[in-house]
Amino acid sequence: MKSSCTCSQCSRCCKFLPGALIAVSDLDRLEAATREAGESEEVWAKRMFVASAGAVLGDSATGQRIEVPTLALKSARNGHCVYFRNGRCGIYEARPSACSHFDSCKQTDAEAQAVGLPMHLERLAAFESGSRYARLWKMLDAAGQRRSRASLDKRVRKLNRRKG
């Protein structure tokens, strides 16, 4: 279910934990809203995204852990999401699924996991099939446009300190 929250708390991630993870289904919508006329797909992708280490999925029965490579929105120089401007989302109608299904003020961990897990599995399937999503991630990673696991962990710790 899409978020309908309008409180300022729900923009915390835009400011302090930017770089929304992009779902496979987000690509076409984001491209339609942000790709400039005549801009190649490669230039657009390099302007928009980084190759992120992504989520780590674990199987409690086997103890197996799988990293799911993920495209993520880039961050601005001030550390905020590149589309967070004047306290608002500049691409609100086309925003990534991770943003549109996130209510940091009232969502429980279980609710967040219920929304996030299908998106992670969709990304994993995209890599297994060699889809456009996987191709863009590999191109960005090869170009050195990536966000490491350590960088993600540092951002989460920073956000948690701000909550406390």
Image: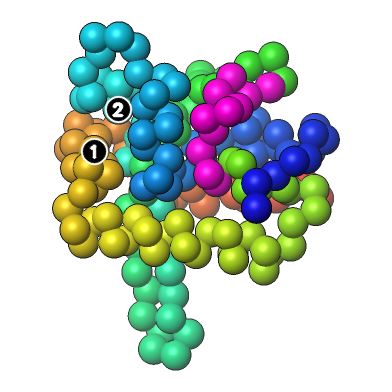
Q: Residues within 10 Å of mark 2 (few under 14, many from 20)?
A: many
**Is residue 117 shown left or right of residue 50?**
right
Say whether marks 1 and 2 touch (CB < 8 Å): yes
Q: Is residue 137 above or below residue 127?
A: above
Q: Is residue 68 visible?
A: no
Q: Residue at x 23, y 24 (%)?
A: 41
State the SS at label 1: helix
**What residue is shown at x 34% (from left), y 12% (from top)?**
36
Q: CA distance from mark 1 to mark 2?
A: 7 Å
Q: Position of residue 160 (x, y in %)?
A: 70, 50
In this rendered view, identify the residue nearer to me: 164 or 9: 9
Quick check: is 71 in the magenta stretch?
Answer: no
Please count the marks in the image. Answer: 2
Q: Residue at x 59, y 64 (%)?
A: 113
For residue 113, side relative to residue 132 (left or right): right
Task: Return the residue at label 2.
Answer: 45
Residue 136 badge: 1
Q: In x, y percent, where is residue 109?
A: 68, 64
Relative side of 106 to 39, left or right:
right
Mark number for residue 91? Answer: none
